[in-house]
Amino acid sequence: MQSDERVVAALAALRPRMAAFRFAVSGALERASSTLASGSGSGQARGTLGDFGGRLIDADRFAMISSGAGPLDPLAQAAVECAAVVLETFLRAGDEEFVVDVSPGRPLAAAIRARLATLGSVFGAATVIDQVRRRTYDPAQHQSLLDGHPFELWSAAERKFAPPLVVRVDGGDLDPFELAPLIDGWVRLVLLVTEPCTAAPLARLVSPGVFVAQAGDMKVLERVTDFDGPAIIAVMSGAEARFIHDPRAGSAMWQRIEVTHMPAAQPRQSLGARSAWQQRDDLSHLKALIQQPVLAANPAEVLVAAGSSGSYDPAERLTAWLLDQSTTDGSP
Amino acid sequence: MTHCAILPLLDDDEREFALGDYEGATARWCPGCGDHSILTAVEKLLVAEQLKPEQTVFVSGIGCSSRFPHYLKTYGFHGLHGRALPVATGVKLHRPDLDVFVVMGDGDCCSIGAAHWIHAIRYNIHMVAMLLDNSIYGLTKKQTSPTTPQGFKTNTQPFGSFLPPLNPLSTTLGTTNVSFVAQTAEWVPAHLYATLRAAYRHPGFSFVRILQRCPMYTQGMYEEAVKNPGSIELLMHDDGIVAPELDKIYKTRATHDPSDLDSARRLAEDSTRIRLGLFYRNEARARYDLLRKPPKVTSSERIALLNQELDHYAV
Amino acid sequence: MTAVAIPVGPELRIAPSVLKRPEHTIEIVSDAGEGAQKCGQIFGAVSAKMGNGVWTVEIIPAEIQPPPRTAEGASGNRIRFGTGPITNWGDETNLVVAFNEQVLLGRHRLGALASDAIVLLENSWASHTNPDIRAAWDKARSELAAQSYRIIEVPMEEQCLTIDENPRKGKNMFALGLLAYIYDRSLERIEEQIAYAFRKKSEEVYQRNLGLLRLGMEWAAANLDFRIEVPTNPPTEALVVMNGNEALGMGVLASGMEFCAMYPITPATSVSHYLAEVFSKFGGILHQGEDEIAAVGAAIGASYSGKVAFTITSGPGFALKTEFIGFAVMTEIPLVIIDVQRGGPSTGLPTKVEQSDLLAALFAEPGDAPRVVIAPATIEECFHAVITARQIAETFRTVVIILSDANLSTGVQPFPRPQLKKEWLAPELDLGPVKTGQRPYEWDARMGTSPRSIPGQPGGMFTLTGLSHDEGSKVAYGAGVHQHATAMRSRKLAVLQQTLLRPAINGDQDGDLLVVGWGSTKGAIEEGVERARAEGIRASSIHLTFLSPLQPGLKEIFSRFRKVMTVEINYSDQPGDPFITEENRRRGQLAMLLRAQTLCDVDCWTRVPGESLRPGFIHKAIRDAVLTLTGDRP
């Protein structure tokens, strides 16, 4: 991996999430070791009792009490050993596991999917270990989990624990529609975009639960550290639009989105697969998102009135106001 | 539901919990006991907030009210008399991922466990502490409690309780680092529920005193308040306990800003009338549980760190 | 390793005579706050590093700041060191450095000093401006003259004033210099230790201390006519040197436990002091509760919801925790309790050693509350016992009490560096679903053991209660249920006992007298036995590590000896005292236990002197017991 200051900075910002992921992997590896050791009976007991207990306690007899589920069958043992190799391989690899380089002209999503499938094999490995520990391991059903575990097959819980990725991509290859299916759980995609790029490629991905940003630097990454949901962030250096859509900032779209820069000129040329019209429409979409609804002559008054219904959540107030309007005179 | 093999603390959210998912054994309190309606309000809260039963722990002490956990299908800890708060402290410090509720009676909280009460307020660890205050020891059959009204006759003070009762609200509001104090009553279910919901959502130690009737030993104690809602003053504020259902019945109201501690203390100290509502809330108070969050350490890191420690003592 | 170079100067008049000794015991005593303990600790650590066997104990006044210049206020260290291993604090002191004559008098009156002890005594008091002090000096000197000590007056203050305007703060390093010269300690090692001891202070402080050290060495070289050689035996394996409380704290780290709740109490608190510094690095929380009860309650709450947790206390705190301990037994929440025993009952002797909590550890509880009690005998065992305790607590869902004492807590001894293993660590929580249908107390009908479910595990929800309950944790007052559940909780002890090994016999496998000990007295007992055996007395000893359940084979071992006698630091009535008869005599705690468990006529020799038992006294007790036995009364 060639060194790139932006990659280093992005990885630094994602460090807590990467550390949590690594910690979980090493926890799974420990479970693998203890599962393998528990198959060995007295040796395990002698180990866990320590030197003091080892001198005073008959490890064989102690093992009879503490071993619980009994020895592993050879297939299950082999599966745990394989799973442990998968986990160790991941732990030995460095930060490059979290970095994807998309060669120019290659499909962006395919590259990300391939990496997620590789990283997903640690989920598969953990599942295998878990099944063996519960004595519910079935080779026919579970063995394939170790050979890569595509994102499509990740459970909701696994998606919630998705590893973050830093993706280096040419602006021309950034097709937002390709990425949409990957936005779920706790996915973090940080796209380091090489110029030129279309003006508002990520605008199309803005939806109520997704943190979406086009930013000029890495500072925005701090904001997603505690965000409970998926996030996709493009870091750009050209004249593209700059905006942040933070689902926590309010319940109406205009409250959540903050646009700090709009390109002065309308796009006139196609880029990659995106035509000029498509690019202009991206921008129109972004502009539409920030439109505030016109509620009444004095919206503040309405909001205060709605407050008496007991809620200070703006969405609930707005709903209350709308209901109120529709029941009184039938038109908002 | 699938749990995540790599991080067993995680599971997906696809389950939906109904009342039946939280119901435990059939409650065996006396008919007419206020505990029943508190249980109902708590179950309603659990459903509304969709708390996962396995991630929820109810800790209690000893007394009538402390049987509470048995009647729920969450994790429950029916502990020792007066000692619910230390146990809850240990649970929440070691397992911040759990939702912790504490159920105490007036003897539990304000008498034998008073030291823990004061310190739990100061620790301000994220949990909901409910004081089910019926002003009497019920389980042991009518002995004076710290909140028994002066002059009230009991089996241990048959000529009337000697001293004025301890005021749990003033005590709580007078304690350093207090962050949430509310009072409600079991016979006003809408207020009770709204109060518990606000308490649950407060990021810190939420203390809720619930006035409670005991049909066996304190008959009539709240008769006037129940019959005449106007005798109760509701503390009103947009940031307070909001229960619009009560608008038509409880018309005695006072505006009180829950961020105003001095006003809260004055209102709590004045015993001329019963006040229900949020006395105080401050989300900015120091939280011991947040200050005491250790890093996650793998076993290899532990071994390496301990070897460094041993190096200091190496010969 | 560079030995101290003897400074050569015009003032060096005669070459000192070198006395060669297999072992020596020294003390450094001062008023509290004058740093004698730091001097002693450094000397002990340096000696251990150079390859001497070492046992260091603190001499602690009961008060934090006792009045200066009082016999009761003596504070400092005793260091016994030798060419071979040293397992206890020994008998009498051979050389003492005293910062004033009153603290020296304190040690003299306690009989701590050998009759031919060498005394290096600060002499500024002799010419003090205060006539009362001068009078006290004269009076003390005449009292001390009753013994044949060799008292050498040292102008410590006068010397220290040449470097530091506050001699009270510098005397300890000057004293270290005296000792470094006398015993030819490695200067390099000392500098290393001083650097570590003052790591939180400035470079200037470090340099000043080095200056004082050199000053002491130079004064000694110029003025003393002797040196003492205690040959060293450079260690063949890696060693660590620490006190028992530090060892307990490190044992905690090695056990993977992550939650400690405690309340300050002497002499247990220093475990928490150690952990407070490092525990969070290891993912741990040290919670100082609002009281002893809250501490054990929080530990139980943590243990109930995750990894085995622990609390640290001493006798009075243990008493307060009793109700909760019974609760943990009843609800089968694993828990480790470290009790660093002190003199009792009540507030008793807060800083002094006693082994009086044994029966409380075993039995203090209304109702039947069986628990595991183990007693490490050495500082090394303090480390390793914690690891075993956690594992037993988890395996058996039970309370494990570790009985240490003030002798181990303040004693410093080198031991082989533990080779750390991952298997010692508590495994990460497995919060996967509970097996369908598994009940909260699914007791194995033979063993009483059962798997536990912890909050977070789907399908495992139950309400734990201290009320009598059945396998489903349902409150059940029925006679049959209570009988069965009580039997299940008790059975776990029997099962654990079946896994224990017989205690090893120190000495011949049979003979006239078997001494039985437990806890910190092991070294002193074995030394006493050894001395007796050297005289031809047929004595052996065993040392019990498990007190509940007791290790197997005791009755059979006892049957091979004509007499069995415990040696303990707790109270027993002395035969021959007024009103004391064989029938009403109250015996030592282990003796009571062994008599009940084995139906053997176990005698005891116990004392509560507020200090560790001296091997010489044990030796004499053994000799007396055997002579009585052979009809040849002493």
Image (tube, coloured by chain):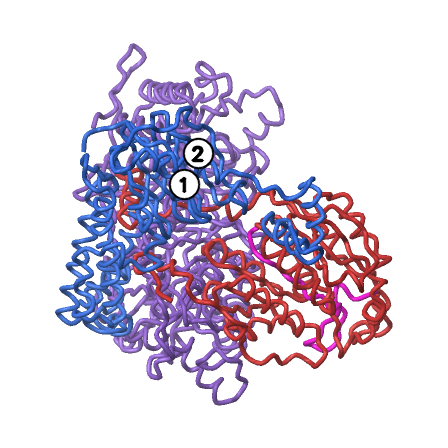
Chain colours: A blue, B red, C purple
- Which secondary structure, mark 2? strand
Check disc 2 and report the residue beneath it.
A243
Q: Is C439 situated left or right of A302 in this image? A: left
Amino acid type of the residue that numbered disc 2 sits on in the rendered structure: Phe
Dot 2 alpha-carbon crowd within 10 angstroms: few under 14, some 14 to 19, many 20 or more = many
* Camera-side residue of B12 and C239: B12
What is the span of residues highlighted in magenta in the rendered image? Answer: B125-149
Q: Residue at x 53, y 66 (%)?
A: C324
Queried whether the magenta region covers residue C55, the answer comes back as: no
Name the residue furthest top.
C10
Check disc 1 and report the residue beneath it.
A212
Query: Which of the image's four quarters has the C terminus of chain C?
Result: bottom left
User: Which quarter of the figure has residue B4?
Assistant: bottom left
Q: Main secondary structure of the magenta part?
A: loop
Q: Are marks 2 and 1 on the same chain?
A: yes
* Camera-side residue of C208 and B5: B5
Residue A96 percent coordinates (x, y): 22, 39
Can you see residue A266? yes
Kindly report the distance in space between the C-alpha atoms of the residues bearing marks 2 and 1: 8 Å
Can you see residue C55? no
Chain of the residue under label 2:
A
Residue C218 percent coordinates (x, y): 33, 18
User: Which quarter of the figure has residue A320?
Assistant: bottom right
Q: Tag on residue B119?
A: none
